[in-house]
Amino acid sequence: MPVHDNSKRMTQQHPTGKPAQFDMFIDTTNNQDGLAHSPSRVTRVKSQPMEEAEMLAHLTATGRYRILHKLEPRQVTGRVRPEYPLHGIIIDTETTGLDHRKAEIIEIGVIAFTFDEHGTIGDITGVYGGLQQPGTAIPAEITKITGITDEMVAGQFIDIPELRSLIEPADLVIAHNARFDRPFCEAFSPMFSGKAWACSNAEIDWSSRGFEGTKLGYLIGQAGFFHNGHRAVDDCFALLEILDRKGEADGISPFAELYNASQRSRVRIFAENSPYDFKDHLKARGYRWSDGAEGGPKSWWIEVDEPDLEDELRYLRTEIYQYPEADPLTKILTAFDRFKALQDNF
């Protein structure tokens, strides 16, 4: 009876035309087809296993496999290099719901790092992850998404002094959905007020970099990694790796693009009293609806770069209001007030 081992196999075609077994752990140096022949049968050849790099190279070369590498967190440095004088924070929160006025933070993850004025990331200077017990039970759908249970957060509190030691030096706070995270963070603690914020989802042109989506899990997968998603610190490390990837064409990393965007002013435009019949036109152009519950006007609104303000006002006056004297409400925003809850900008 032939002897079988537990090596990984792939089917290939024998020179005789009959199917044969390809063994990823076989030594083919003395046999071109990787098989040992006898007058009566094909037998297996004992060999040393392939090295991991060889296996990866072989699978990739076939064109039939895509390799995902486990994302390994970077280490906190013991010596901060002076050529990276600026301080950045990547932050992620897990919450009991979507409304910062009602829901609570149950987990915060933070990575502190240094960078220079060109947007080059330097050293990891600190990491913090903490759970907090909310005032009510965690909804089942939140546990399903995050894996965080009531038992995990029982008696847990976020360490405010430790968190503050990382947040206070920050020149820029980054979240992958800053419009969600910033209102929650500022409702949680005043340490987040007065900070410049940037959104790695909205302020980076991911499509020009070959990505077909902007969700963090998709960015990670398309970049060739996998990680333990929907836990705050893990998501922060995942975002750091994506931000630090170099651009294929111009060499500008996503983080450099994001930092440059954070230095520019934007303008929020409120299309108050716009005709109802044009709501689909506004929506298609990127306008979002505010019901006024957060303190701003009840209207469609959009944010544009400051140089694009006149073009957007011209569009509203000619296509929506259809009279040249229309004067929509506008507000100039910098990174210090961008992504705040709407009521905080009035």
Image: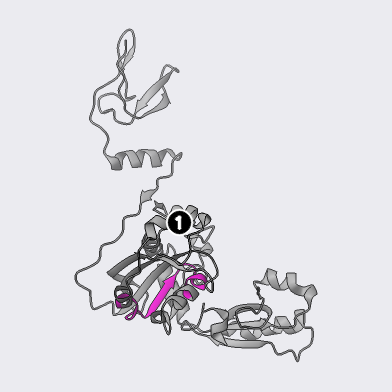
- What residue span does the magenta drawing correspond to? 165-182
Q: Which residue is mark 1?
A: 146
Quarter holding the N terminus?
top left
The residue at the far left in this view is: 78
How is the protein colored in the picture?
A: one colour
Displayed quadrant of residue 341: bottom right
Q: Please give left or right for residue 152 compared with residue 277 in the image.
A: left
Please say whether residue 177 is one of the residues in the magenta stretch: yes
Q: Could you say which is closer to the camera, residue 182 or residue 136?
A: 136
What x and y, as percent, mark residue 315? 71, 80
Q: Which residue is more in the foreground, 305 or 290?
A: 290
Picture layout, residue 276 above or below residue 147? below
Farthest residue to the top: give it: 40
Q: Is residue 16 magenta?
A: no
Q: Residue at x 50, y 67 (%)?
A: 201
- Judge whether residue 87 can be spotted in this image: yes
- Quadrant of the snapshot with the C terminus: bottom right
Which residue is nearer to you in this view: 45 or 97? 97
Say what secondary structure mark 1 lies in. helix
